[in-house]
Image: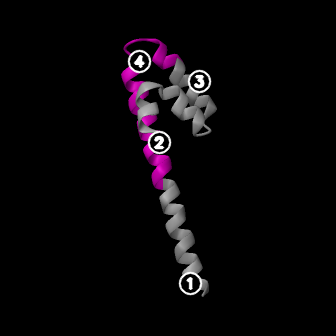
Amino acid sequence: MIAIAVLLPWLALMLRGRVFQGLLCLILQITLIGWLPAAIWAVMVVKNDNEERRHREVLASMNNQRMR
């Protein structure tokens, strides 16, 4: 997913369910200078989403252990 975020930042955002951000990123990527900030933005979103998913999994696991 990181490779997609670097090569096609708008697609990475859209695949994460962030359609409006994906459209803004596409507009930014259209300019040659805007491609680098768009790629950095997309990589940050992908990493943040992965961290949030891991955090939710850890919390769910802790809650399951507490109920036993």
Residue 65 lies, with reference to residue 10, above or below; the image says: below
Magenta span: 27-51
Q: Earlier in the sequence, mark 4 or mark 2?
A: 4
Badge 3, how many Cα within 10 Å: few under 14, some, many 20+? Answer: some
Amino acid type shown at disc 2: Val
Amino acid type shown at disc 1: Arg
Q: Which residue is pictured at 57% across the width and 70% down the height?
A: 60
- How far apart, in angstroms, are the residues tagged by discs 2 and 1? 31 Å
Amino acid type shown at disc 4: Gly
**Location of residue 12 in the rendering, given as x and y in whole percent from the top left corner:** 52, 33
Q: Earlier in the sequence, mark 2 or mark 3?
A: 3
Residue beneath label 4, please? 34
Residue beneath label 1, please? 66
Q: Earlier in the sequence, mark 4 or mark 1?
A: 4
Q: Which numbered dot is residue 46?
A: 2
- How far apart, in angstroms, are the residues tagged by discs 2 and 3? 16 Å
Q: Which residue is pictured at 41% across the width and 19% down the height?
A: 35
- How far apart, in angstroms, are the residues tagged by discs 4 and 3? 13 Å
- Does the magenta run of residues contain 44? yes
| Quarter of the view holding residue 3 | top left
Q: How is the image coloured?
A: one colour
Q: Which residue is pictured at 53% across the width and 26% down the height?
A: 10
Residue at the bottom extreme of this rendering: 68
